[in-house]
Image (cartoon, rainbow, N blue to C red):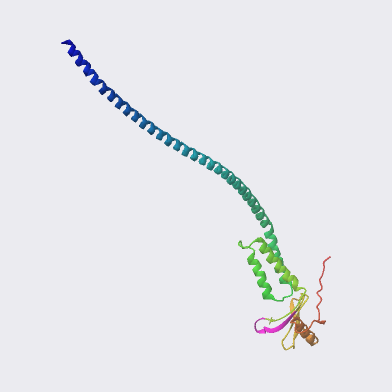
Amino acid sequence: MQVPALRSLLFCCAVVSPIINATTLEQSLSESERLSQTAQSSQKRIEQLDDASQAMLEEYITTVAKAKALEGYNEQVSELIAAQHQELQSYQQQLEQLQETEAAVMPQMRRMVEVLAEFIAADVPFLPVERADRLSALQALLPRADVSMAEKYRRILEAYQIESDYGYSLEAWRGELGVDEAQRSVEFLRVGRVMLYYQTPDGHESGYWNAQAQQWETLDNSVRRPLQKAIAIARQQKTADWLELPVKTLVLEVQP
C-alpha cells in the first residue's frame, strides 16, 4: 500500500515542475521587458537632458557674447559722454568769454554810435532824413538780444563807411528848404562834405550852407551857371569837368 502512494507523489511532482518553470520564465520575460522599457525611458530622459544641456550651453554662449558686446558699447558710450562733457565745458568757457567780451565791447559800440550822432549833428546838413533814420536804426539795434554782437558791429561799421564815402562823392537831389510857409523846393548839391549848395529850379536864387554861422546864405548870380553845370554833372547828365564854385573857408581858433 505504501508503494502506490509514493508513485502518486512522484507523479504530482513531475506535473508541477513544468508548471513552475513556465511561470518563472514568464516572470523573467516580463521583468526583462520592464527593464528594457525602463532603460529606453531612461535613455530618452538622458537624451532630453543632453538636448536641454546643449540648448542651455548655446544660450549661455550667446548671452556671454551679448554681454561682451554690451560691455564694449557701454565703454564707447562712456567715452562719448566724456567727450561731450569736455565739449560742453569748452562751450561754457567760450560762452563766459563771449559774455566778458560783450560786456567790454557793448560800451565801446554805444560810444561809437554816440560819436556818429555828434558828428552828424555838427556836419553839413545834407540828407537829414536818411542819415537820421540810419542813426535811429543803430540806436534801436544796440539793446536787442536777438541780434548778434557781430551783426551789431557790422552795421555800425557800415554806417561809418557810408559817412566816410560822403566825403569823396558829388551828389545832387531835390529837397525842401526852409520851414512852414517859407519852405520851398530846391536843388541841393553836395561837394564831398566840404560845401553844400542849393539853387531854385528857375535858377534865380543860389546859396550855400555857412558851417561857421550854422545857417544858409545866398550867393550872387555869378555862380548860377557853374552851379547848374555842377548839378548836371552830379546827376550824370553831363560828363565830368572842372568846377568853379565858391568855397567858404572855415577858420578855427586854437587856444594856446
Residue 6: horizontal and vertical position, in percent? 20, 13
Quadrant of the rendered image containing residue 172: bottom right
Residue 97: horizontal and vertical position, in percent? 67, 53
**182 is within the stretch colored magenta:** yes
Q: Is residue 154 or residue 107 the one in the foreground?
A: 154
Does residue 219 appear in this view?
Answer: no
Q: Which residues are magenta?
A: 179-189
Say above or below: 88 vs 156: above
Q: Is residue 34 or residue 242 the one in the foreground?
A: 34
Quadrant of the rendered image containing residue 12: top left
- The residue lying furthest to the right in this view is 256
**28 is within the stretch colored magenta:** no
Q: Is residue 214 or residue 125 the one in the foreground?
A: 125
- The residue lying furthest to the left in this view is 1
Q: Residue at x 59, y 47 (%)?
A: 81
Say above or below: 206 vs 55: below
In the rendered structure, the answer to whether residue 170 lies left or right of residue 68 reads right
The N terminus: image quadrant: top left
Q: Is residue 102 or residue 50 the one in the foreground?
A: 50
Does residue 39 appear in this view?
Answer: yes
Q: Residue at x 65, y 84 (%)?
A: 181
In the rendered structure, the answer to whether residue 131 lies left or right of residue 25 reads right
